[in-house]
Image: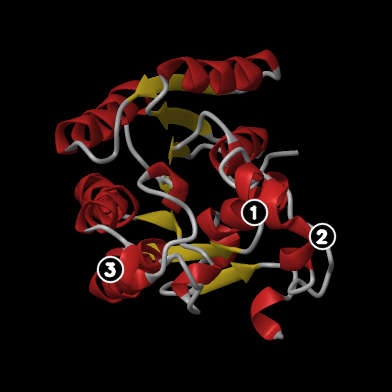
Amino acid sequence: MSGILQGKSALVTGGGSGLGRATAIAMAREGAKVAVADITEAAAADTVGLINASGGQAIGIGGNVAVEADVAAMVARTVAAFGRVDCAFNNAGISPRNVGPAGQRTHEMSRQSFDDMLFVNLTGVFMCMKYELIEMLKTGGGAIVNTASVAGLIGLPTATNYVAAKHGVVGITKTAALEYATDNIRVNCVNPGYIKTPMTDPTMAARFDALMEKVPMRRLGVPEEIAEAVVWMCSDKASFMTGVSYIVDGGYTAA
């Protein structure tokens, strides 16, 4: 039986681990040819190895979404390998711990920490969308899913830079959805809650019990649960869905 992405080509950023790796594997399982991009090229290659060993088709691409030339090259290599970009999961990102000390309130946060966060988590998504949209306009359509967060919908203390970036992702997702609706290009975002990934491991080690008290399901999500949502949003089964923030958070934002 054919998968729901059969015959499509996909680009996944941040595909070397966590949500990106799980989604790349799920896309391949559903029939897509997948370009796996990551700032750590060896990690991308590991994901590619897992896909190809399971009978899928994938290529690895090294690159930094904060560097425009790298983003342009990611998209160009995907097109060179597979002929087009039908689906894109703009997932690469960083946590507040990557750009400064943890636990800082707004007045304590440096301008550099704020700028660095936005440059990767917001400007990086914008640049990916820009080059993907250029290709999708050439080929008559496509589907883009951006990684936002519950932090794109609510406030989180001591995460001003991250919250600002993720709110921005939600905003540019909605705007692009409106701009390209008549071009057969759908743009949505996924808003994960607390998911077990290498990025969240330090936070979970420090505050697991306190955080789980806020999650009605009383557990972390796993990357595969986000991957299934993204694959569905990229498929034709979600053909009337655009401009949506799709929440997968164990009930966190419902409380």
Q: Is residue 160 left or right of residue 221?
A: left
Q: Which mark is residue 219?
A: 2
* Identity, as a three-letter code, of the amino acid under mark 1: Ile
Residue 211 to residue 30: above or below: below
- For the residues bearing labels 2 and 1, Cβ distance under 8 angstroms: no
Q: Residue at x 22, y 49 (%)?
A: 127
Residue displayed at 30% across by 47% down? 120
Q: Is 32 rendered above or below residue 122? A: above
Q: Which mark is residue 226?
A: 1
Q: Nearer the viewer, residue 97 or 222?
A: 97
Q: Which image quarter is the C terminus in?
A: bottom right
Going by the image, does 40 lie left or right of 172? right
The residue under the point 75% across, 66% down is: 210
Q: Is residue 252 above or below residue 149?
A: below
Structural distance between the alpha carbons of marks 1 and 3: 22 Å
Q: Residue at the spot x=67%, y=18% of the render?
A: 55
In the rendered image, residue 111, in percent from the top left (x then y), is placed at 21, 58
> For residue 69, what is the image quadrant?
top left
How far from the left and from the top, in percent, is residue 41?
Answer: 41, 18
Residue 176 marker? 3
Q: CA distance from mark 2 to mark 1?
A: 14 Å
In this image, 119 relative to 100: left or right? left
The amino acid marked with disc number 3 is Ala
Pointer 1 local density, CA inside 10 Å: few below 14, some 14–19, many at least 20: many
Residue 59: name its quadrant.
top left
Q: How many marks?
A: 3
Look at the image and tell me whether residue 240 can be seen: no
Question: Badge 3 local density, few (<14 within 10 Å), some, or many (20+)?
Answer: many
